[in-house]
Amino acid sequence: MTGAMRFDAVLFDLDGTLLDSVALILASWHHTLAAHGLPPVRDEVILAGMGTPLEAGFSQWVSDREEIARMVATYRAHNLAHHDAMARPYPGITELVRGLRERGAQLAVVTSKRREGTLKGLRALGLEDTFHTLVCADDVTRAKPHPEPVHLALERLGKVDPRRAVFVGDSTHDMESGRAAGVHTAAVLWGPFTREALEPTSPSAFVRDAAELHAFLTGPA
């Protein structure tokens, strides 16, 4: 890759943005609901909460905090056990991220997944040593769509000016978090959400593949 960087820092969501793990997430959800005696739900209901912590998702059906904790444990066990067989990089993404690192961009992952699962995902991507910092669910008290995760990433990267940063994600939660934090946002269209679903969050750009994302990140300011 050649060309200058439009941004000093590039923040990435993980699932649905870097890592094609949607089928894994759905399978883990369906397994957990069945294991805890809850009726099945439609995929679109599950996907609507993608990008937020598991505890928030399960609380739609269960109010007991101890039972929610048990459900989270069931989900994580299933997800980690099947991760490497079901999760894979989106086309061109690993090469894109490595190229950004070589060009000197400050890189962060901002995810609602806990650190153990995040590291497993980065190993599947071949990017475990590429990011300068990771902001995971265990690092914040207020998850996306709150701006706290994005603010923390910018702080850890050396107090980057939000106007010189961009958050790349696939969900409305990502876009809302980035916008609230004052950074630019790029909505990827290879995840589970359509352009129509993302348009109300007014992203700075929509990108259909790694080549379009590369052009947006490295084009003129």
Image (tube, rainbow, N blue to C red):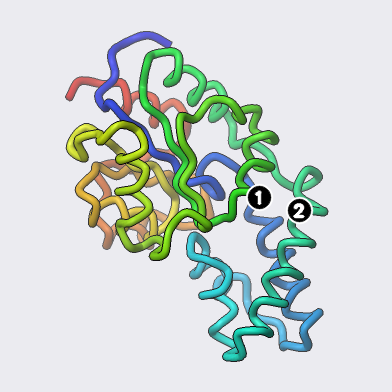
Please report the residue visible at 21 percent of the width from the left and 32 percent of the height from the top: 164
Quadrant in which the N terminus appears: top left
Residue 63 falls left or right of residue 217: right
Q: Which mark is residue 143?
A: none
Whichever of callouts 1 and 2 sits on the residue coming sooner in the sequence is 2
Q: Considering only vertical position in the picture, is 167 above or below 136?
A: above
What residue sits right under mark 1 in the picture? 117
Mark 2: secondary structure:
helix
Nearer the observer, 38 or 40: 38
Do labels 1 and 2 touch, CB within 8 Å? Answer: yes
Q: Residue type at mark 2: give it.
A: Leu
Mark 1: secondary structure:
helix
At which x and y percent is residue 185?
Answer: 29, 44
Nearer the observer, 107 or 157: 157
Number of residues whose C-alpha sits closer than 10 Å to that of mark 2, classed few (under 14), some (14–19) or many (20 or more): some
CA gap, disc 1 and disc 2: 7 Å
Please report the residue visible at 41 percent of the width from the left and 64 percent of the height from the top: 141
At which x and y percent is residue 207?
Answer: 38, 39
Number of residues whose C-alpha sits closer than 10 Å to that of mark 1, classed few (under 14), some (14–19) or many (20 or more): some
